Amino acid sequence: MTTIKLNIIFHICRAEKILPFPITSILERKHKITPIFIDEGLLCNHQFQFLISKDLKIQRSQNIDQDEIN
Ligand SMILES: [Zn+2]
């Protein structure tokens, strides 16, 4: 399985880590934008997802906790 390493930054707490992702799950989708779920503990203690485009550019990340942190 081919993976790509992406430098993930969660915009709310500024946690940053390079994580591997399977590249086929991004490129084989019909949609131009793929949401990728980051579970709690993988990057920090937040759960969130980010959107990645087919040219493997991270579009944005969004908190999926029930409470928004401002
Ligand atoms: Zn966090």
Image: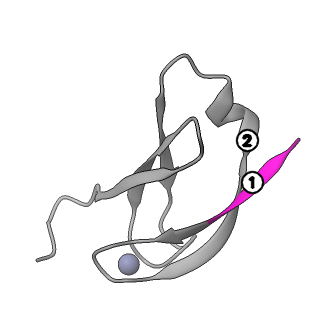
For label 2, the crowd category at 10 Å Cα-Cα, with few meaning under 14, some 14 to 19 and many 20 or more, is: some
**Disc sitting over residue 23 in the figure:** 2
Q: Which residue position is annotated with label 1?
A: 4
- Along the polypeptide, which appears first: circle 2 or circle 1? 1
Colouring style:
one colour
Above or below, 70 against 26 in this view is below
Label 2 and label 1: CA atoms lie apart by: 6 Å
The amino acid sitting under disc 2 is Ile
For the point 59% across and 40% down, the residue is: 55
The answer to whether residue 3 is magenta is yes
Dot 1 alpha-carbon crowd within 10 angstroms: few under 14, some 14 to 19, many 20 or more: some
Q: Residue at the left extreme? A: 70
Was residue 48 drawn as part of the magenta stretch in this picture?
no
Q: Quadrant of ligand 1?
A: bottom left
Instruction: Point out residue 40 in the picture as x, y percentages from the top left corner.
Output: 47, 67
- Number of numbered discs on residues: 2
- The residue range painted magenta reads 1-6
Q: Is residue 65 left or right of residue 23?
A: left
Residue type, label 1: Ile
